[in-house]
Amino acid sequence: MLSSFAVPVEPEDKEKELLALARLVTYARDSAKTLNVEGVQYCLELALASLLKEAEDCGGKRAHLTNELLTRPSLGRC
């Protein structure tokens, strides 16, 4: 049986984690766009917008830069 536990997250770490998730979702969104699966792409865009809002709410110094992720193509492509 799996057990879950909560680890306290510092505000600086929370922003880093949110930005890491945003990069992951950006990659998935770009892949969905390439595969022409519009419903998936739309849902990932909603998830990305939510992550960016959370990052901005953290009040981090880099939060204003996160909006670039909405338009930036994935860095994982060759």
Image (tube, rainbow, N blue to C red):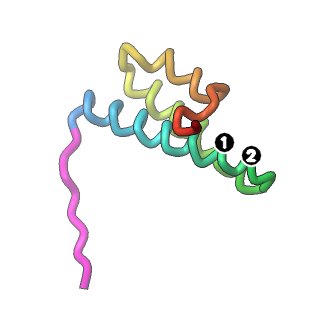
The residue sitting at 19% across, 46% down in the picture is 8
Q: Which residue is mark 2?
A: 33
C-beta proximity under 8 Å, tags 1 and 2? yes
Give, as a three-letter code, the residue at label 2.
Lys
Q: Which residue is mark 1?
A: 30
Q: Is residue 67 visible?
A: yes
**Does 40 appear above or below 21?**
below
CA distance separating discs 1 and 2: 5 Å
Quadrant assignment for the C terminus: top right
Q: Nearer the viewer, residue 75 or 67?
A: 75
The residue sitting at 33% across, 32% down in the picture is 16
Q: Residues within 10 Å of mark 1 (few under 14, many from 20)?
A: many
The spot of residue 60 in percent (x, y) is 36, 19
Give, as a three-letter code, the residue at label 1.
Asp
Magenta stretch, residue numbers: 1-9
Q: Quadrant of residue 39?
A: bottom right
**Does 58 appear above or below 51?**
above
The spot of residue 44 in percent (x, y) is 64, 48
Image-based side of 78 in relation to 61, left or right: right
Quadrant assignment for the N terminus: bottom left
Q: Secondary structure at mark 1?
A: helix
